[in-house]
Image (cartoon, rainbow, N blue to C red):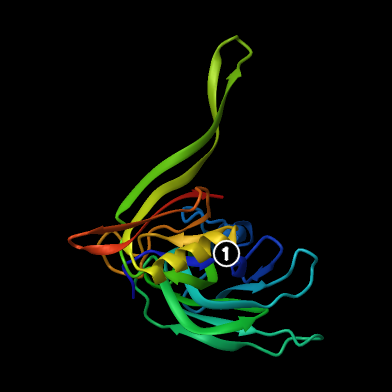
Amino acid sequence: MSEYPQFFNTNQNIIETDDISFYSGEGTIYNAIDYDRNTKYESTGSNDSTTEYLDITFYTADGEHESRTLDKLILLNTNVKYFKLYKNNWNGSGWDGWVEVLSVTNNADSSLIESFTQISTYRVKLEMYTTIVANQDKYVGEFIVTSLLYEATMPMDVFNIKDIQDKNIQRLYDGTAQMVVFYNKWAASIEFHQISKTELNNLKDIYDLNTAFIVILEPYDYNGDYDKPEECYRVIWTSAWEQKYYTNVKGAGYNVKLTLEEV
């Protein structure tokens, strides 16, 4: 359980080259992996006697089976009460069979982070059995399986959110002008103050990855309950590395500034 920012490895999560199978809800299946909690995968004609599932097989961009290392399950905007996560390994010619890695029997939260013993696997399956309100169609806004890169041990000292828009002026047939917004992106400026050398190195390791990662900056809900995040984002670190050593009567440590932008 953590109240501080968490950073996850996006390369271990579900990506576009992976294969997804399911029991029902065909038209909404990709909503579960689009990094938008407001669009949802939703089953069709389900109830608490129907087992729904999302079955993900991991592939490289070249179509080869790929093993990924996982230790976290994140579900956002869900109504599922009882669910299990399974793994299945590829032995070169076939599947070894499903092995349970996580079981949650009485979830009452719309968003959650669950930890499990680290695994390396070629395939995962989320089985969903019952809903918080009984006998409803099951839905999931975001289904993320990933590995933890770094969990901070201190709060953010500065946290400013802004939206980035790609927009343009288009001339209409009658000669008038209209503003057209192509997309909105989340971005944030963050500072950590007087952190230890270990914390500094952990952040520098993420910066040095030079690739996208998943971040949950506020891993709690609007009531302040931990491990129930309202939002998570797939981001890149867009600012240059910036650190300063700082000392005063309260102590000493490093100040780090970073700017993150949704991708």
Q: Quadrant of residue 92?
A: bottom right
> How far across and down, in percent of the image, does residue 5 sit?
38, 64
Residue farthest along the left direction in this orientation: 249
Q: Residue at x 73, y 84 (%)?
A: 90
Q: Residue at x 75, y 75 (%)?
A: 65
Is residue 29 left or right of 225 when viewed as pictured? right
Residue 223 coordinates in the image, percent (x, y): 25, 62
Relative side of 107 to 93, left or right: left
Residue 182, by quadrant, is top right
Q: Which residue is mark 1?
A: 10
Taking the view exactly as shown, the residue that stands out farthest to the top is: 175
Query: Mark 1 packing: few (<14 Cα in 10 Å), some, or many (20+)?
Result: many
Residue 135 % position (x, y): 43, 72
Whether residue 27 is visible, yes or no, is yes
- Identity of the amino acid at label 1? Thr
User: Which residue appears at 42% of the width and 65% of the height?
Assistant: 200
Q: Secondary structure at mark 1?
A: helix
Asked whether 80 or 93 is in front, the reply is 93
Estimate the x, y position of residue 155 in percent, counting from the top left: 30, 62
Task: Give the position of the N terminus as an image quadrant.
Answer: bottom left
Number of numbered discs on residues: 1
In the rendered image, is residue 137 in sight? no
Q: Residue at x 60, y 9 (%)?
A: 175
- Which one is nearer the viewer's eye here, 57 or 238? 238
Relative depth, front residue between 256 and 6: 256
